[in-house]
Image (cartoon, rainbow, N blue to C red):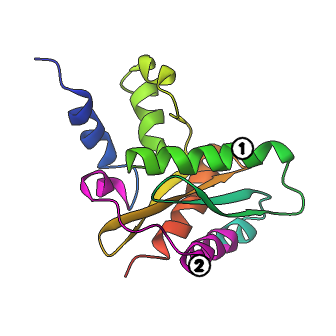
Amino acid sequence: MKPTLIQLSLAAAAFVSVNAFSQALPYGAPISLDVAKKAAQAASHEMRKNKLEMTIAVVDSGGNLVYLERSNQAGLGTIEPAIGKAKAANGIKAPTKLIEDLIVKQQLVNLIAVPGAFPVEGGVPLVVNNQVVGAIGASGGMPADDGAVANAGAKSLLP
C-alpha cells in the first residue's frame, strides 16, 4: 500500500526542525508585534553571527505580514521569498524544508504545483503555548543558512 501524503509529511517532519510536529498543533491567536519582534531579533542575531545579509519576515496565524526586517545589504529580491516562506510554513504548520524534502527525497514533484507551497528551506512555524501563532521566514543565504536563521527565531519562543 502506498503511503499517504500525510504519512510522508509526518515521517519527513521528524527530522526537519525543532517545530517539526507543529502540524498536529492548533492555530492560536495571531502573534503580537512584540513577540514577532522577539523572534525576528533572535533570527537577526543568528544572521549577524554568521555574517549574512538577509530579509526576515514574520506572519501571524492568519498568514498576514506582521514584521519585516531587511539588513542593509540584503538584495531586494530577498523580500518576497522571506514572506513566501513564512506564509507557506504557517499554512502547512511545518517548516518549508518539509516541502523541499518531499519533492527532492520522496520525488513528489506534484507539490510544486500547490498554490502557496514554497519548497525551499527557510520558513518555520512559530509555536507559543502549544499553538501555532504564525511563522518566520528568512531569505538571502544558502537554503541551510536561511533555515538556521529562521529556526533561531522559532527557538527563541520555546520555553
Task: Please identify the quarter of the rendering in which residue 21 is found.
Answer: bottom left
Of the 4 image quadrants, the one containing the N terminus is: top left
Q: In this view, does 123 lie to the left or right of 133?
A: right
Residue at image coords 56%, 51%: 86
Vertical arrangement, residue 8 with respect to residue 17, above or below: above
Farthest residue to the left: give it: 1
Residue type at mark 1 is Glu
Magenta range is 19-45
Near mark 2 (Cα within 10 A), the count class, few <14, some 14-19 or many ≥20, is some
Residue at image coords 69%, 70%: 44
Instruction: State the image coordinates of residue 61 (x, y, percent, origin top left).
Output: 45, 59
Residue at image coords 40%, 76%: 158
Q: In this view, does 117 lie to the left or right of 65?
A: left
Task: Please identify the quarter of the rendering in which residue 105 is found.
Answer: top left
- Residue 41 belongs to the span the image colors magenta: yes
Task: Please identify the quarter of the rendering in which residue 54 is found.
Answer: bottom right
Distance (Cα) linking label 1 and label 2: 21 Å
Instruction: State the image coordinates of residue 154 (x, y, percent, origin top left).
Output: 49, 67
Residue type at mark 2 is Lys
Residue that badge 2 annotates: 38
Disc sitting over residue 80 in the figure: 1
Q: In this view, does 104 lie to the left or right of 4?
A: right
Vertical arrangement, residue 120 with respect to residue 156, above or below: above
Near mark 1 (Cα within 10 A), the count class, few <14, some 14-19 or many ≥20, is some
